[in-house]
Image (cartoon, helix red, strand yellow):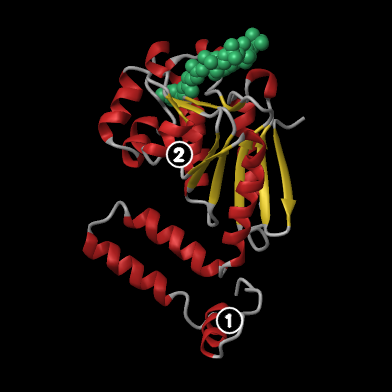
Amino acid sequence: MSFVNYDQDGAVAVITINREKALNALNSQVLDDLDTTLNNVDTDVVRCLIITGAGPKSFVAGADIGEMSALTKEEAEFFGRKGNAVFRKIETFPIPVIAAVNGFALGGGCELSMACDIRIAADNALFGQPEVGLGITPGFGGTQRLARLIPVGLAKQMVYATTNIDANQAKACGLVNDVYPQEELMPAAKKLAGKIAKNAPIAVRHCKQAINEGLDLNMDKAIDLEAKLFGGCFESGDQKEGMDAFLNKRKHEPFQNK
Ligand code: DAK
């Protein structure tokens, strides 16, 4: 049995962390299942992924505290590396990934959402990094990605004081793009994913790479990276079709990913 469901509908696929009884907490098996699921995504066909949690209450309530409680230093390091490798796989996944945050996004759950390109939330979402209350530091990127996504003082308060923020506060500080009533979250996520999937896939992938890698570079290097990725779109069928359609005042044909 897998703790991760995968549902593909054309160019959009939904990954659901499915361990509802434990509020979708991430144990080793969930991380392994997530890794395997990601490895099996057919990125020739799928153009946008959505990650969400099973049930109405929780996206992911963190790493599994029961499993972590008994770890030795070496095992904890291994567990941390496993989680970080999966989260990094999501962050660098060739196609965009949307987190549809449907409730608790605590600890590893907040961190999972931050590894995604875009976060949207249901109005019951709650974001936080409660780790220091458990005697540990955030270990799946929480000290790094949070401070890059929201004002650093607020990130520090969330991490040092374990202050949680609700969906509206998350929107106000830019952690999520939009907030929806619970029942509207997945339709909204699919609509957004569909919009992304309709655009030229090679160009979208290159944009993801340019933005993510560019953020770690100085502006001269970042612009150089952008130029390379811009050039990389040319001579593709989709570039020719997109521009030809504009010049001839017609709607472009569906992009072909080539
Ligand atoms: N782990 C394991 N089980 C969890 C869980 C978690 N994080 N969160 C909830 N559950 C389980 C509960 O134990 C309970 O199980 P049963 O008792 O029914 O068997 C079930 O889910 C329902 O939870 P509650 O009964 O507590 O539900 P409530 O609505 O009353 O409360 C809650 C919901 C989300 C407020 C509460 O469950 C809660 O506070 N959960 C823990 C949240 C949390 O502290 N999350 C952060 C976990 S620490 C690192 C790598 C990774 C990490 C750190 C370091 N390194 C390598 C350095 C990551 C750390 C974390 O994510």
Task: Report the side of 152 relative to 66 (left or right).
Answer: left
| On-image quarter of the C terminus | bottom right
Q: Secondary structure at mark 2?
A: helix
Relative depth, front residue between 53 and 142: 53
**Where in the image, quadrant-wise, is ligand 1 located?**
top right
| Position in image of residue 84 (x %, y %) | 47, 35
Could you tell me if the residues under marks 2 and 1 are in contact, i.e. CB atoms within 8 Å?
Answer: no
Residue at coordinates 66% horizontally, 46% vertically from top-left?
187
Name the amino acid type tagged 2. Answer: Met
| 40, above or below 29, in the image | below
Residue at coordinates 42% horizontally, 17% vertically from top-left?
73
| 160, above or below 246, in the image | above
Which residue is label 2 attached to? 114
Q: Earlier in the sequence, mark 2 or mark 1?
A: 2
Which residue is label 1 attached to? 237
Q: Residue furthest bottom?
A: 248
Name the amino acid type tagged 1. Answer: Gly
Task: Report the side of 156 relative to 250 (left or right).
Answer: left
